Image: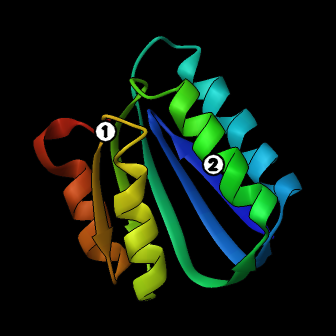
Amino acid sequence: MISIQHAGHLVTANVLGEFTLADYREFEERVLEKLRSGKKVNLLIDLRDMVRYTLDVAWEDIRFTHSHEHDFGKIAVITDNQWLTWSAWFSRLFVDADIQVFEDDRAAQDWLKAHGTSD
């Protein structure tokens, strides 16, 4: 399940339980709505409550980020899972955004707000 909020040029996604392809496509739709403004979008992705994700989600993430490699400013990922941390760093190969991994939401939000880039 996914919960998505947006404000300004920031899209916040919280994943709870299993992250499915339908969830990811909902996330894509929200991000694409924001990208229509012509400005870069920042992402805050909270994976602390994610139990697992399906292989098709991983593939879709690679496809989506590669096709929008220049559309993101900052991407903050919140997780304490080492595998997800490595996955976030791997994503740097497909997108030119500034990507950081955090263990708590306050630090992630502060980083996104720094230098006025989160709107």
Dot 2 surroundings within 10 Å: few (below 14), some, or many (20 or more)?
A: some
Q: Label 1 vs label 2: CA separation? A: 15 Å
Looking at the rendered structure, the kind of residue marked 2 is: Asp
- Give above or below for 119 relative to 38: below
Judging depth in this view, the residue of 58 and 5 nearest the camera is 58
Q: Secondary structure at mark 1?
A: loop
Q: Report the quarter where the C terminus lies.
A: top left
Res 78 seen here: no
Residue 58's x, y, as percent?
Answer: 67, 58
Residue 35 visible, this orientation: yes
Q: Which residue is mark 1?
A: 97
> Residue 117's spot in the image, x, y percent?
24, 36
Question: Horizontal placement of 113 versus 36: left or right?
Answer: left
What's the residue type where badge 1 is placed? Ala
Q: What residue is at 18 percent from the left and 38 percent from the top?
A: 116
Q: Earlier in the sequence, mark 1 or mark 2?
A: 2
Tell me what residue is drawn at x 54 percent, y 38 percent: 65
Task: Please identify, in this view, whether the residue under mark 1 or under mark 2 is nearer the observer.
Answer: 2
Judge whether 80 appears above or below 8 on screen. Answer: below
On-image quarter of the N terminus? bottom right
The location of residue 74, given as percent across then percent down, is: 31, 44
Image position of 91 (left or right of 118): right
Left or right: residue 87 versus residue 25 is left
Image spot of residue 34 (x, y percent): 57, 26
Residue assigned mark 2: 61
